[in-house]
Amino acid sequence: MIAEATGNTHPVLVESTRLFNSGCYVEAQKKLRVFLQKKPQNHQANILMAMIKEAVADYNSALDYCHQAQKNSPNNRNYLYLEGVIYVRQKKLDLALAHYKKFFQHYPNDLDALNTVYAIYSSRENKPAQLKTLLNIATLTQLPQEKLQQIYALLAETQHLIFDTITTNGIIALIQAEQISDGLLTRHLTAYLIEKYNLSSPQPKLNLYEIFQNNLFYLGIGCTRFSSIEVEKLLTTLREAILTICIQRQHVEAVAMPMIEGIALQNYLNEYIYPIKDSEQKIITETKKLLEIQTKNKDWHVQQSEGLLLLISMFQPLYELPIRKILLNTPISKWPKSLHKIAQKTLFNIHDELALSEQIPSITPIHDEVSMDVQQHYEEHPYPRWNQIFVIPLENIGSAILRYIPDIRDQLPAPLFNESTPILVAGAGTGRHPIIVSKRFPKAKITAIDLSRRSLAYATLKAKQLNINNVNFYHGDILEFDKREQKYHYIECNGVLHHLDNPMLGLERLLQCLHPGGVIKIALYSATARKAITSERDKISKLNIRPNSDSIRSYRQAIINAPEKHQDLLVFSDFYSLSECRDLLFHQHEICFTWELIREYCHTLDINFLGLVGNQKIIDIYNKEYPNSATNDFGKLTELEQKHPYMFRGMYEFLIQK
């Protein structure tokens, strides 16, 4: 209320404000006119009259009262803001933007004005300005889910993000609020680091203490995994320099701790895939010995070893330390702030994950030899180690399908349009896929199964962390599904069938769990897109390399050292984390598909191929090439992939119907 906001308690203004807020505009105007005849310069009365005129769409009069108020109170927030609103109402948007530019000189953090400006930019589809304004708002307040989703979409569409002060502070605010989804910033932060530190140069010049002051740098590397050789070289160079300096000085300076924490978290995100030099390993070995000596002191507490633990955490998980039991006995609340995230992720969570893996319930046995080999793979390296996701909830499965394939409404069974229809996710992995499904369809009951107990333990912990209550995780093998009686109208099976000895048998088992007319979403590796990977896997197989962590790092480094020969491998983001690199190059069993092979499967099993889903960019390219054809034409899909051989670098994603 104007009278309350300005502290003015004059009875006429108080009563006029009450009438205005009640919608009694005529009565309020009558009182104010009498008042203004006696006190024409009173800016509270003028601004209240301007608000009334704006409410009744008398915009010219409203502006007159705003300008009258300005004479006695030049920078009053209320009428300055209202003047901009009036220009918007008059559709004088250029004038409104120019006005708010001046307004922000006096009130740079005014959320009402920022939201008004954002609405103007949205109406004009000025996406760079939309994003910058939203990021400005993010520095001032916690954003609602709707605006977060708008930021995510704009970041995904933006080709080159300019990190000026507003954008930088907005990104930092989102990181600190843990409101950034995995991978969303990777491309932008990679470009930022390459440009800022001239990483394309053979020998970029780095000022260590200037880098320590770069909040965006150390916060960014702590929240998103990078898929860049240039950034990897930067971080390994920094890691070595920091380690050397700290050991020489026998002290870890406070100014370096945020960067050390960031490097440690980046190594956690990539599962410590970066190579370690012999000289570094020697220092870390001595550092661990010193840590053990410190912890033997009966008066030891974790704060005394903050520096040593930080240095070690850049090279390995704290859980791998011989003294982990001692560390686990110190509650996370008593750890130094610099180690909170690192200790939680690389010590306590791993301990909980291993304990929980023994408690995951089984719904089928595992007898198939290839399934047991694949199970062992993911017990050793659960895949992927993901962090955070943000997903827009959808109405129901049927509506989601029609977004991609709009002409099949009559083919879909009615239960798919029920928001609580149960869903089976065959191949839960570490939970990212089923939790995305659960967020899309929050009222559906989801059953998620996987071969790996360790992966399912990670999934269960993530579900608890994210307050996901509609997913049940089970240990089992889809090849044993012929013994199960429960049937579903909808199943998702991403990245599973191509790891079976007999993918067609696996698909048959899923079809046995499907009601007539039910739909399965499937994702499979493309033989064309993974040609370079298949070739490299053949080399690895002939060399008989055991896929442990050290051999993966070593072989990977050999590839990095000859980039000109391996460009087709370096573009895969999976190359930049340990479990994903193993999955990419060292998997126990992998069969790649072609559209012709998928056609044969559909023919043999008498199932209907509905078309593409998932990647809208691929669908848009298809529709541009074949404007009058649905995306279920195998011939056209084959032709399209021949034109764009890396189009399905992720996977083929499509729907089939029983």
Image: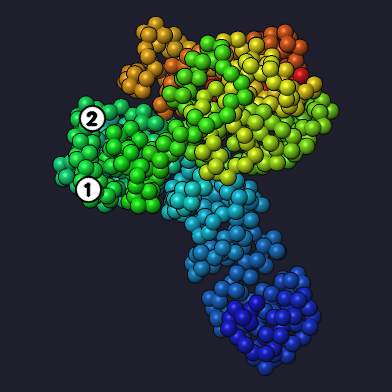
Q: Give the residue at mark 2.
A: 281
Q: Would residue 473 be visible to someone looking at this image?
A: yes
Instruction: Give the side of residue 303 with respect to residue 64, left or right.
Output: left
Given residues 635 and 252, the one toward you in this image is: 252
Q: Please tell me in which quadrant of the rendered image residue 345 appears.
A: top left
Residue drawn at (48%, 51%), measured in percent from left and top? 177
* Foreground disc of the pair 1, 2: 1
Given residues 171 and 276, the one toward you in this image is: 276
Instruction: Give the side of residue 156 with respect to residue 377, left or right.
Output: right
Q: Please tell me in which quadrant of the rendered image residue 475 appears.
A: top right
Residue drawn at (30%, 27%), measured in percent from left and top? 275
Residue drawn at (22%, 32%), measured in percent from left and top? 285
Q: How is the model colour-coded?
A: rainbow
Q: Please state the horizontal and vertical placement of residue 328, each as a whole percent of the image.
A: 36, 42
Q: Please state the horizontal and vertical placement of residue 232, each as a whole percent of the image.
A: 35, 32
Given residues 564 and 486, the one toward you in this image is: 486
Residue drawn at (41%, 36%), measured in percent from left and top? 351
Element carrying mark 1 = loop
Instruction: Give the side of residue 470 with respect to residue 352, left or right.
Output: right
Say whether marks 1 and 2 touch (CB < 8 Å).
no
Quadrant, the C terminus: top right
First-in-chain label (1 vs 2): 2
Amino acid identity at mark 1: Lys
Quadrant, the N terminus: bottom right
CA gap between label 1 and label 2 equals 28 Å
Q: Give the residue at mark 1.
A: 298
Q: Give the vertical position of 433 relative to 59 (above or below).
A: above
Q: Give the vertical position of 267 relative to 531 (above or below).
A: below
Q: Would residue 167 be visible to someone looking at this image?
A: no
